[in-house]
Image: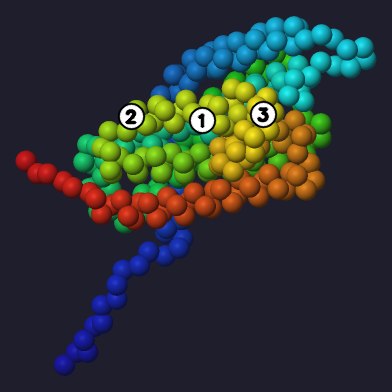
Amino acid sequence: MTDAVALRPWRRTPSATLGLYLHFMRFSFLEYLAFRLRYYTGVVSYTIFVAGNYYLYGALYASRPAQPDEPITLGGLTLAEMVTYVGLSWIGRSFYFNNVDRELSGQIREGHIAMLLLKPVHAQTMYACRAFGEAAFRLLMFTLPIVLVVGPLFGLLAPPHPSLYGWTLLSFLLALLVNTQINFLVGCLAFYLKNILGVIRAKMVLMEFLTGVLVPFTFFPDWVQRAVGWLPFQAISYIPVMTYLGRRSGDDLARGLLIQAAWAVGLLAAGRWLWNRSVRHVTLQGG
């Protein structure tokens, strides 16, 4: 008689898991590469956005009475710093922006989420990897061209110290993770609301203000600044841009990066919890 063979449950090795999710990142990069022409036209639209703010703030600063031997400041920023703030805010947005919420809600609304649930992958990790793949494409094909156009055209300032280039890049990477997890949480609402296009539009408008892209937080009253400080949105744009401008250094720089990292981890955990709870509400109809 032959000995009975014990069957072991299949488990994917850590290296195979890493390779799988890197594949999602690579596939996302190649997917967006096929539609790169529309991002070249996006360089024009982003330049127009920055130009509008450039002339708006130029007129606003020009209306302020000049003080002898003192530069005109608004919200603690000179005109050159304000132009750099606006330009870098839009440059950063071209890097970290993604449509994870739209993609996930579309999968849920159209019923394709069932096929995703059958695959041996975790949706949250998969969408995060796809977002990083898209960000890699955006960095090369969208963000860098915008820098080459907007930087010289509007005279954006360099950071006070060369090391701030690296800290700013790290800060924007954390901003990408925070933004992706917020979008994933919003996308999960489709399990309950089915159609969340209105929610997505409201979120986009709200985030333009709460991230500090349109107006720096220093323009707001103190109580608004304190309230916004308790929200994750400052970690998406305001902290990276102020890091670049040198307004965060030493302990304040470390505190800003820790705030971003804490929100990234917290939102990651919240997304995992909401996903595990939401998949119980999946209902499918055959036909």
Say which mark, if any, is on residue 207: 1
Q: Amino acid at mark 2?
A: Leu
Q: Left or right: 232 with respect to 59? A: left
Sequence-wise first label, 2 or 1: 2
Res. 151 image quadrant: top right
C-alpha separation, residue under disc 2 versus residue under disc 1: 15 Å
Q: Left or right: 250 with respect to 93? A: right
Whether residue 194 is visible here, answered yes or no, is yes
Q: Check disc 3 and report the residue beneath it.
A: 221
Q: Identify the residue at image location x=65%, y=27%.
A: 220
C-alpha separation, residue under disc 3 versus residue under disc 1: 18 Å
Q: Position of residue 101 (x, y in %)?
A: 38, 37
Q: Identify the residue at image location x=16%, y=46%.
A: 284
Residue found at the very far bottom of the displayed protein: 1
Q: Position of residue 108 (x, y in %)?
A: 26, 41
Q: Left or right: 184 with respect to 56? A: left
Q: Quadrant of the N terminus?
A: bottom left
Mark 1: give few (<14), some (14-19) or many (20+) Cα within 10 Å.
some
Q: Is the residue 148 above or below the residue 280 in the image?
A: above
Q: Check disc 2 and report the residue beneath it.
A: 197
Q: Quadrant of the C terminus?
A: top left
Mark 3: give few (<14), some (14-19) or many (20+) Cα within 10 Å.
few
Mark 2: give few (<14), some (14-19) or many (20+) Cα within 10 Å.
some
Q: Amino acid at mark 3?
A: Pro
Task: Say what secondary structure mark 2 lies in.
Answer: helix
Q: Position of residue 50 (x, y in %)?
A: 61, 15
Q: Is the residue 108 above or below the residue 82 in the image?
A: below
Res. 25 image quadrant: top left
Q: Amino acid at mark 1?
A: Met
